[in-house]
Image (cartoon, coloured by chain):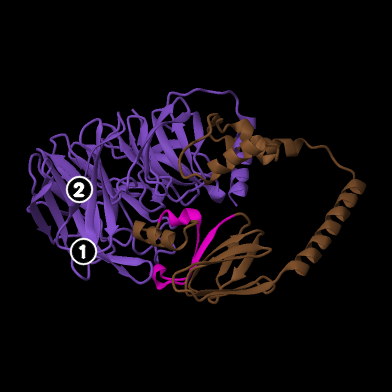
């Protein structure tokens, strides 16, 4: 089967190469991760700019195991990935148009629930440990990615699991003033494949030196904080250093749909989430959202579903339903951005500079394109067109 | 030795040495990004340009004699008839069951491979194009075919692909997901599917 898939891909790249005018070694600023049609291997598309007149790009084929191809961490042109087969954490670098394996490190967990950068060189990564009768146990890694060494690793049991909701999801990790901060919730299985999350979110503050729990803050305004942020972003720090994050109780993540998708804030230097601050997205727009990206000037973009357009998991990812909205973090006012409707669950496809918001969209005309929103004039315009072989544009990452 | 485009070309042509063949197959099965070291520059909208060129070339094609057309049509017709005859001769109807609670069961057939999860069964009738099943299974077709499920939905299967099929109410209705679709399910669902079907 893999050979046939590969053969199809090879024929298509060979046909493309026959048609190319000249080899071009580009200085890429962006990489787009493409799920391609006909089950061809996932590929990276390297481009110099996101503008419409962009004329050349380079595609790098990845392997054929497609399920987890979009799950990686990208920082300054380096890529980090954890194998769910071997628990080996690897570091790659883009050199020209090649992806070079630099180093690897053996961990004991095959999945990261959430990650954040402690500083430029140190990654904090949290994994759930499903050890019998210790289901609320998480493992925290601090990895120096330059040296590719584990600086420290610790296990912590996070309290408040119940007999009914015992399975842990750690959705956010932050580091401030010598303390580790984790946001988490508990879920239970529902049926053979389903799950639902309990009504409560917990915020734990942990002394990082002693790894002792200092405080647990209970949150009942929403549930399922953050998510798997190696797939999509759920938090950011603004220019002041205030930490914003979203909760995701919609069916694609927490699946406790009666609670709202919301944005919360933890002010710089604080360990407690501000109990007076909440932007209730679901109440404002009548839908759940997944994914948040900081723009500038106190604004952020969110990506929301439309419940009237999908029926269930059979078509949630494939219908053209996703909208983009601009949230004023100070006033809570939410404005719709008039991009074409998008498809694909949990995409990491938004980037912005001081003037524009860019979003890579797969629209209902089977056109795959980066769209631009002018922050001053609020006009929408076209950016770079992506190859027709694309099915889903699952990521857009800035490399510099 | 590193994977490169030349080696891949040789692999598809069946001209690799045993060492090269092993290396390429390892790369195809690997979940890492040990990518090939030679990449192609792709001009923007190259696909469209290619099709435009095809159109232009087609317009330029000179007139072909009717005798030649008739001869070619006869050959195509004969080939088509013989192909259909061969097809009907080889189609079959099979029933598969797995009574185990938690172990999968693998079946390999002429036209597809099937991996049934625990407590699942499937009746795959390629003669009448019908699928009746209960539970979950993965099917890897070796040829293209279409099946109608119990709700009269038309399910299209293509050779060389891999499909996850389930009637679990957790998905809302009968689902036929290609492997790439599974990437969009919630992580907990993906993990549970992977726990059952380790080959996914």
Subunit ID for the residue under disc 1: A
User: Residue B107's quadrant in the figure?
Assistant: bottom right
Q: State which chain is coloured brown.
A: B
Binning the other alpha carbons within 10 Å of mark 2 as few (below 14), some (14 to 19) or many (20 upward) gives many
What is the magenta range? Answer: B161-184
Q: Does residue B193 appear to the left or right of A213 in the view shown?
A: right
Q: Residue at x 16, y 40 (%)?
A: A175
The disc at residue A259 is 1
- Which residue carries the number 2 mark? A245
Binning the other alpha carbons within 10 Å of mark 1 as few (below 14), some (14 to 19) or many (20 upward) gives many
User: Residue B48's quadrant in the figure?
Assistant: top right
Can residue B62 be spotted in the picture? Answer: yes
Can residue A48 be spotted in the picture? Answer: no
Percent coordinates x, y for residue A358 in the rendering: 35, 38
Percent coordinates x, y for residue B106 in the rendering: 56, 65
Tag 2 secondary structure: strand
Percent coordinates x, y for residue A280 in the rendering: 18, 56
Tag 1 secondary structure: loop
Q: Does residue A351 appear to the left or right of B85 in the view shown?
A: left
A76 above or below A334? above
């Amino acid at each position: 089967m893999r050979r046939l898939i590969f053969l199809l891909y090879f024929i298509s790249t060979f046909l493309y190469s026959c048609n190319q005018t000249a080899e071009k070694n580009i200085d890429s600023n962006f990489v787009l991760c493409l799920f391609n049609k006909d089950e061809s291997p996932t590929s990276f598309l390297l481009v110099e700019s996101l503008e419409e007149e962009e004329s050349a790009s380079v595609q790098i084929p990845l392997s054929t195991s497609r399920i987890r191809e979009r799950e990686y961490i990208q920082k300054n042109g380096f890529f980090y990935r954890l194998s769910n087969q071997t628990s080996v954490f690897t570091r790659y670098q883009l050199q020209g148009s090649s992806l070079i394996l630099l180093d690897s490190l053996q961990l004991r967990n095959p999945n990261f629930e959430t990650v954040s950068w402690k500083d430029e060189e140190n990654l904090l990564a949290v994994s759930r440990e499903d050890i019998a009768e210790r289901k609320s146990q998480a493992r925290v890694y601090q990895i120096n990615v330059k040296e590719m060494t584990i600086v420290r690793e610790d296990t912590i049991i996070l309290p408040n699991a119940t007999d009914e909701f015992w399975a842990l999801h750690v959705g956010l990790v932050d580091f401030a003033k010598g303390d580790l901060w984790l946001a988490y919730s508990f879920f239970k299985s529902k049926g053979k494949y389903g799950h639902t999350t309990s009504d409560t979110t917990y915020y734990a503050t942990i002394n990082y030196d002693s790894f002792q729990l200092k405080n647990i803050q209970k949150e009942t305004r929403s549930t399922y904080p953050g998510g798997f942020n190696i797939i999509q972003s759920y938090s950011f720090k603004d220019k002041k250093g205030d930490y914003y994050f979203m909760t995701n109780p919609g069916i694609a993540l927490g699946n406790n749909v009666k609670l709202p998708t919301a944005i919360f804030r933890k002010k710089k230097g604080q360990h407690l989430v501000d109990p007076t601050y909440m932007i209730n997205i679901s109440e404002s727009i009548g839908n759940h959202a997944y994914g948040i990206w900081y723009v500038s000037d106190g604004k952020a973009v969110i990506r929301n579903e439309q419940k009237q357009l999908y029926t269930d998991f059979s078509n949630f990812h494939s219908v053209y339903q996703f909208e983009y909205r601009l949230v004023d973090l100070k006033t809570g006012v939410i404005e719709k951005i008039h991009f074409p409707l998008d498809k694909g669950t949990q995409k990491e496809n938004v980037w912005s500079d001081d003037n524009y918001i860019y979003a890579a969209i797969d629209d209902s005309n089977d056109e795959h394109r980066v769209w631009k929103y002018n922050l001053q004039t609020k006009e929408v315009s076209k950016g770079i067109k992506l190859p027709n072989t694309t099915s889903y544009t699952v990521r857009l990452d800035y490399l510099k | 030795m590193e994977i490169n485009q030349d080696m891949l070309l040789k692999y598809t042509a069946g001209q690799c040495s045993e060492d090269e063949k092993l290396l390429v197959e390892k790369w195809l099965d690997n979940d890492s990004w040990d990518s090939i070291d030679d990449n192609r520059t792709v001009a923007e909208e190259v696909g469209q340009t290619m099709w435009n060129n095809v159109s232009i070339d087609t317009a330029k094609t000179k007139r072909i004699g009717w005798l030649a057309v008739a001869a070619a049509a006869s050959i195509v017709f004969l080939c088509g008839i013989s192909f259909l005859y061969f097809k009907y001769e080889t189609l079959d109807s099979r029933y598969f069951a797995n009574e185990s609670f938690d172990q999968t069961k693998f079946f390999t057939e002429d036209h597809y491979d099937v991996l049934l999860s625990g407590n699942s069964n499937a009746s795959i009738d390629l003669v009448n194009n019908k699928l009746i099943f209960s539970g979950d299974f993965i099917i890897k077709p070796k040829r293209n075919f279409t099946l109608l499920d119990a709700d009269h939905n038309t399910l299209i299967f293509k050779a060389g692909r891999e499909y996850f099929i389930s009637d679990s109410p957790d998905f809302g209705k009968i689902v036929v997901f290609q492997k790439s679709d599974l990437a969009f399910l919630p992580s907990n669902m993906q993990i549970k599917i992977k726990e059952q079907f380790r080959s996914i």
